Image (tube, helix red, strand yellow):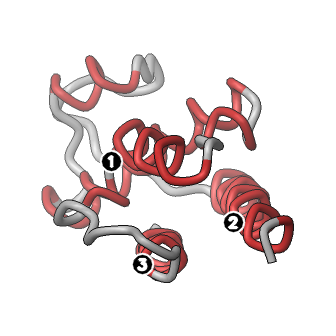
Amino acid sequence: MTALQRVTESMYEKLPGISAAPFNVFQRMDEASELWQSAIGRGYGDILNATEFVFLKKMVQRRHKLGHSQGMIDSRYVRNTGDSNYQPGQRLVVNQADVRELAKVATKLVAGLMQHRLETQ
């Protein structure tokens, strides 16, 4: 997730005529998508299908739980993600399938954002 944040942040900053993005906006997928939509006319939902975008947002929330709560699930996580696999108080489990899917979705997103750059050169 950090790599996705850094690459999208770097790509955004290189756009001509763009002012600095809000702090950590690329950790907030809906806001980041709106920022890209305003800048290039293409948001994350134009690149990813609905299932992929929901998955990406859930993985961001999981990353926050791992980084800030030692992987402990709280009611806010359950409410924000709709993830019925967990209840507050449980510990988050990272599995290989989710890691692979996240890599696939992140790669698709970055490729879609890069495609705009290629189209405008």
Please tell me which residue lies in front, 117 or 67: 117
- The one nearer the camera, 86 or 24, is 24
Q: In the rendering, at what x and y percent does residue 5 appear?
A: 43, 70
The correct choice, above or below, for 85 with respect to 65 in the image is above
Depth check: 6 or 19 in front?
Answer: 19
Mark earlier in primary sequence (2, 3)? 3
In x, y percent, where is residue 106?
Answer: 66, 61
- For this orientation, the residue located farthest to the front is 17
The residue under the point 61% across, 35% down is: 53
The amino acid sitting under disc 3 is Glu
Residue 67 relative to residue 12: left or right? left
Q: CA distance from mark 1 to mark 3?
A: 17 Å
Q: Where does label 2 land, which residue? A: 110
First in residue order: circle 1 vs circle 3 = 3
**Does residue 113 appear to the left or right of 119 in the view shown?**
left
Residue bearing mark 1: 28
Viewer-nearest of discs 2 and 3: 3
* Disc ID at residue 13: 3
Q: Amino acid at mark 1?
A: Arg
- 10 Å crowding of disc 1: few (<14), some (14-19), many (20+): few
Q: Quadrant of residue 110?
A: bottom right
Q: Residue at x 50, y 76 (%)?
A: 16
Label 3 Cα crowd, 10 Å radius (few <14 / some 14-19 / many 20+): some
